[in-house]
Amino acid sequence: MNEQRQRALGVWSMLVVAFLVVGGVLAARNAFDPAFVALYWSPIAGAALVGILPRPWEALPA
């Protein structure tokens, strides 16, 4: 596994795990809202588009 793929996998794994934990807590309290999804993923998607974060498909095997 090359370093770039490993970094992308690590970054996106942590982002998804954090989303699932916070989303799970909100769902358990009946407070999960589609706005949460947009507010969570919009800055992350923007950062990936401009190159601050690795693109998620870089973590996929070739």
Image (cartoon, grey):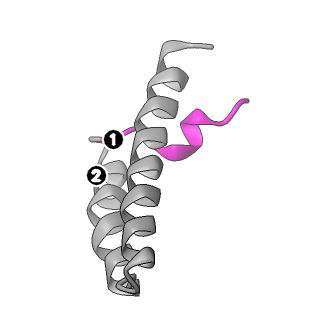
- Residue 39, quarter of picture: bottom left
Residue located 44% across and 25% down the image: 7
Of the pair 15 and 31, the residue shown nearer to us = 31
x, y percent for residue 12: 46, 42
Please name the predominant secondary structure of the magenta segment in the image.
loop
Q: Which residues are magenta?
A: 53-62
In the image, residue 1 above or below residue 23: above
Q: Give, as a three-letter code, the residue at label 2.
A: Ala
Q: Going by the image, does 26 lie left or right of 12?
A: left
Q: Going by the image, does 7 lie left or right of 50?
A: right
Residue located 31% across and 66% down the image: 40
Q: Does the magenta run of residues contain 61? A: yes
Numbered circles on residues, count:
2
State yes or no: discs 1 and 2 in contact (Cβ < 8 Å): yes
**Residue placed under numbered mark 2 in the picture:** 47
Residue located 58% across and 43% down the image: 57
- Residue 37, quarter of picture: bottom left
